[in-house]
Amino acid sequence: MTQSERTREGQRLTGVSRDQREERRDADGPPAGDNGTLGMKIQDLSAFYGSFKAVTDVSMDIRANKVTALIGPSGCGKSTFIRCLNRMHEVIPGARAEGTVSLGDQDIYAKNSDPVVIRRRVGMVFQKPNPFSKSIYENVAWGARINGFRGDVDEMVERSLRQAALWDEVKDRLKESGYGLSGGQQQRLCIARTLAVEPEVILMDEPASALDPVSTQKIEDTMAELKKHYTVVIVTHNMQQAARISDYTGFFYIVNMGDPGRLWEFDDTEKIFSNPERKETEDYVTGRFG
Ligand code: ADP
């Protein structure tokens, strides 16, 4: 493919032209290519399940107040990797990680680092919405309270629900069960619950893959708001979604069956989708495999 064919293909996939993207970036603040502030720094991270190495040697800088998308074929380690960023990986028996993950000036794998504190600073939203069997209000308030929240709970619940773009739909039924909400609303409730403890980073593992298109759109709409306050890392199988919502994209890939997954290419989203450096990335983003 020539450069201009690639750019056109990128625009076809993303539905966003370069001009539109530039405009959006102007509105959002500095362009992703400006590097911004560092949110997390990952150096030589490898992840294991027992003796099986699932991910090898990932180094990556996650920029603060940006959305970083992780894409790539199934089984190449995206979920495993993202779970290493808040020490959730190690809760699986036999699972462990090697390497360095820094959050600010703290190495989250340092001996004196408390995984409970790390998981509060780096929150996680899962693929399937998993609200508690509590009221909508308590779904948001409970975790913050047990994490020592001492402020105005009503105000915190409203702020979190607003940031998750759910407030208007639930403000008159806060006492009702979270289970009574639609799947898309439950997922936004889980996002609100994660925001309630004021994390610095939010990890999302395919948060919209089980949802209908309208709910997916609402989750995507929350991203622009979320990154004003938080750093977001999202795994997605949906390339259009990655292209629409992210500033940076990491492509994970496995060379041969049984090999560990690697970060094959990591760059500005615009570049990954219109002019990637590596052939495998181009084949993947143009839908030739996956
Ligand atoms: P992706 O998110 O890219 O689909 P995963 O991180 O889920 O990839 O999986 C990476 C590799 O780790 C795969 O080979 C998968 O089979 C393996 N794996 C994932 N979870 C476990 C687990 N709990 N125990 C053992 N192996 C696992």
Image (spheres, grey):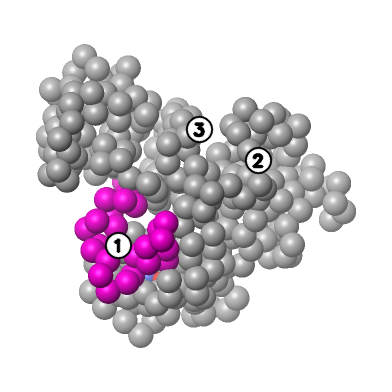
Mark nearer the N terminus (1 vs 3): 1
Amino acid at pointer 3:
Ala
When asked about the image quadrant of residue 177, the answer is top left
119 part of magenta stretch: yes
Amino acid at pointer 1:
Met
Left or right of 75 in this view: 149: left
Quarter holding the C terminus is bottom right
Separation of residues labelled 1 and 3 (CA atoms): 26 Å
Left or right of 204 in this view: 185: left
Report whether residue 172 is seen. yes
Residue tagged by mark 1?
88
Which type of secondary structure does the marked residue at label 3 adopt?
helix
Separation of residues labelled 1 and 2 (CA atoms): 31 Å
When asked about the image quadrant of residue 93, the answer is bottom left
Q: Nearer the viewer, residue 30 or 289?
A: 30
129 part of magenta stretch: no
Instruction: Ligand 1: give its quadrant.
Output: bottom left
Mark nearer the N terminus (3 vs 2): 2
> In the image, residue 257 lies at what x, y percent?
53, 78
Q: Residue at x 23, y 28 (%)?
A: 157
Separation of residues labelled 3 and 2 (CA atoms): 14 Å
Crowding near pointer 1: few (<14 within 10 Å), some, many (20+)?
A: some
Q: Residue at x 73, y 57 (%)?
A: 276
Which type of secondary structure does the marked residue at label 1 adopt?
loop
Q: Which residues are magenta?
A: 101-128
Label annotation for residue 31: 2
Which type of secondary structure does the marked residue at label 2 adopt?
loop
Amino acid at pointer 2:
Pro
Left or right of 137 in this view: 216: right
Crowding near pointer 2: few (<14 within 10 Å), some, many (20+)?
A: some
